[in-house]
Image (cartoon, rainbow, N blue to C red):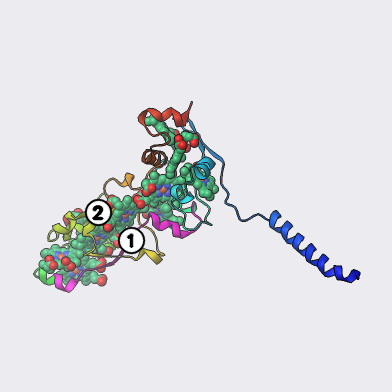
Amino acid sequence: MRNKFIPISIILIVLFGLAVAGYVSPEKKEKIPVRVLFKNSGGKVIFNHIRHHRDYEIPCEKCHHERKTSDDEPLPCGSCHPESFDKDYVREHIRSFPDTSYCVQCHHAELGKLNFDHAAHEEYADEDCQACHHGNDIEKEPQKCGNCHTNSGTSEIPSVRDAAHDRCIDCHDEMFEAGLKGCTPCHKMQNMKDYSGDFTACGQCHQENDKDLVLNRTNAFHDQCMDCHKKLQRGPYKESDCSKCHLK
Ligand code: HEC
Ligand code: HEC
Ligand code: HEC
Ligand code: HEC
Ligand code: HEC
Ligand code: HEC
Ligand code: HEC
Ligand code: HEC
Ligand code: HEC
Ligand code: HEC
């Protein structure tokens, strides 16, 4: 008779074990700070992180816009929006990212093959090689511009970019007037999806307002915090609201 109870006991023990295991090992929870303290010259800001997410029901991706999957650990904003894009940043930033897929968020374009029909241009220039090449005081024989003109140039010898463009512009001013939209007749662009080469400084292509291409740290915070508050008409965003975030 007693044997009857053995299978039932085993089932009960197993069920109990499962219940305990489920209780002890919680479902995978995201690591999220409760509050974030910013110390800055405007007076420190205490940001109630958990309240924004849980009570105001704002999804992570709304603020951590660099996240690709919900398993990604969000990066500090300063990895991408530093105080300034100076030499230190250029040196350090390369190590701020978990993998290289982040790079192309900013390094979004690279030049590909030069699209230039040399033979046709000899004709367009009426066989006058010096429409583009130097006379033999500089170039003994016509050759690639990059043999003497470097990427950054010097005070005497302009960069390859400026040297070549200077010649092409004689007949193609309309392409250069089109600014960044005028590059593609001459430069095929790389497909950045599976790009794996070196990165070109932004300023090689963007010659003006280089500094404003990515928001700096303060503007990144001000814009993100204030834009949302303003859109929802909740939370501080007015000119007179500084002290609602910045405590003395
Ligand atoms: C309302 C905007 C907002 C929401 C929503 C939000 N966060 Fe944040 N989170 C921030 C800000 C701002 C910081 C501070 C980042 C810094 O100091 O660079 C931060 C910091 C963090 C950090 C620390 C990162 C570090 O190393 O500095 C983690 C981790 C994090 N958040 C995870 C999450 C997760 C996970 C969610 C969703 C469950 C979430 N956050 C939702 C704005 C937000
Ligand atoms: C991996 C790099 C990266 C991280 C980390 C990052 N950003 Fe950005 N952020 C960018 C890039 C790149 C742009 C420009 C995107 C564009 O122009 O579409 C941008 C644009 C913005 C903008 C402009 C408006 C918008 O949403 O497009 C704001 C505001 C901003 N970021 C705030 C933040 C804040 C605050 C954090 C931290 C919570 C943060 N960013 C973290 C790369 C990053
Ligand atoms: C948030 C934007 C951003 C992200 C993300 C980013 N970079 Fe940059 N990177 C810059 C800026 C801005 C510069 C300065 C360019 C300039 O001076 O014109 C730069 C400069 C560089 C330079 C120097 C280029 C030169 O010739 O001066 C290299 C190399 C570079 N980045 C590599 C990387 C790599 C590798 C990654 C990914 C691991 C990466 N970057 C991610 C913005 C970014
Ligand atoms: C419209 C401008 C232009 C004219 C006219 C021109 N060239 Fe060129 N040539 C170039 C450019 C630009 C390059 C570099 C192309 C490159 O880097 O792929 C070049 C490169 C060359 C090269 C090196 C090719 C190589 O692959 O190493 C030779 C040789 C050359 N040109 C000869 C001539 C001769 C000879 C004439 C006159 C009959 C002439 N070019 C007329 C623009 C021109
Ligand atoms: C053998 C070396 C050499 C080669 C190859 C060369 N350059 Fe130059 N280039 C120079 C030197 C040196 C200077 C500066 C001296 C001067 O200003 O005359 C210069 C200056 C220039 C300048 C500014 C002064 C001017 O002449 O208008 C332009 C534009 C230029 N090169 C365009 C080109 C182009 C386009 C090519 C290729 C088709 C090319 N160069 C190939 C050596 C070279
Ligand atoms: C002497 C005048 C002249 C010079 C200098 C010149 N080109 Fe051209 N180019 C022409 C002519 C003419 C055509 C054919 C008609 C047209 O499409 O405008 C042409 C056509 C082109 C095209 C095809 C146009 C299209 O819309 O697809 C490209 C690309 C090009 N040139 C590149 C260059 C480059 C690069 C340089 C400088 C190294 C250069 N050209 C210098 C006269 C010139
Ligand atoms: C009329 C044709 C033409 C147009 C338009 C043009 N380029 Fe170029 N570009 C050239 C030629 C030719 C070279 C020299 C290539 C060589 O000899 O390696 C060059 C070189 C460069 C270089 C340096 C070499 C390199 O591969 O990094 C940069 C950067 C560059 N161009 C950027 C631009 C940008 C950005 C635009 C649009 C604003 C543009 N170019 C428009 C013809 C053109
Ligand atoms: C190889 C050339 C090239 C390089 C390098 C480059 N860009 Fe651009 N960028 C472009 C072109 C071309 C456009 C215009 C795209 C369009 O209008 O379709 C553009 C557009 C932009 C825009 C949109 C606003 C504007 O000015 O038109 C931003 C922001 C930007 N780039 C940021 C960057 C940053 C940051 C870097 C360096 C980390 C960078 N770019 C490097 C070619 C380049
Ligand atoms: C995506 C929207 C959104 C973003 C981004 C956001 N907030 Fe808020 N914030 C809210 C909402 C909604 C409230 C609720 C206001 C209420 O209920 O009165 C709020 C309230 C606040 C308040 C007042 C009440 C409280 O909860 O402390 C402060 C201070 C505040 N936010 C600071 C910030 C800071 C600092 C940032 C940037 C780091 C930020 N917020 C980013 C939506 C946002
Ligand atoms: C919604 C909250 C919020 C409001 C409102 C706000 N700020 Fe900020 N402010 C921040 C945050 C977050 C930072 C980023 C702190 C950091 O860089 O660590 C910041 C940064 C700054 C800085 C940068 C200091 C430094 O060290 O570079 C100054 C200055 C500043 N704010 C002044 C102001 C002024 C003036 C106002 C009113 C017109 C204002 N802020 C309104 C949240 C706010």
Q: Is residue 110 left or right of residue 162?
A: right
Q: Is residue 110 left or right of residue 171?
A: right
Q: Is 15 part of what is drawn in magenta?
A: no
The part of the chain drawn in magenta is 96-121
Q: Residue at x 45, y 60 (%)?
A: 101
User: Which sits in the foreground, 75 or 156?
Assistant: 75
Horizontal and vertical percent position of residue 239: 36, 30
Per the image, the residue denoted by label 1 is 110
Q: Say whether marks 2 and 1 touch (CB < 8 Å).
A: no
Q: What element carries label 1?
A: loop
Kind of residue indicated by mark 1: Glu
User: Which sits in the foreground, 95 or 67?
Assistant: 67
Q: Is 98 part of what is drawn in magenta?
A: yes
Horizontal and vertical percent position of residue 173: 14, 57
Which residue ends up furthest to the top in the rendered image?
A: 248
Q: In which quarter of the image is residue 132?
A: bottom left
- Ligand 8 under 8 Å from disc 1 Cβ: yes
Local packing at callout 1 (Cα closer than 10 Å; few below 14, some 14-19, many 20+) is many
Horizontal and vertical percent position of residue 88: 44, 45
Q: Which numbered mark, 2 or 1, is in the foreground of this view?
A: 1
Per the image, the residue denoted by label 2 is 158
Examine the rendered structure and indicate whether residue 221 appears above or below residue 185: above
Q: Can you see residue 52? A: yes
Q: Residue at x 33, y 59 (%)?
A: 109
Q: Distance between the residues labelled 2 and 1?
A: 21 Å
Kind of residue indicated by mark 2: Pro
Mark 2 vs mark 1: which is more N-terminal? 1
- Ligand 5 under 8 Å from disc 2 Cβ: yes
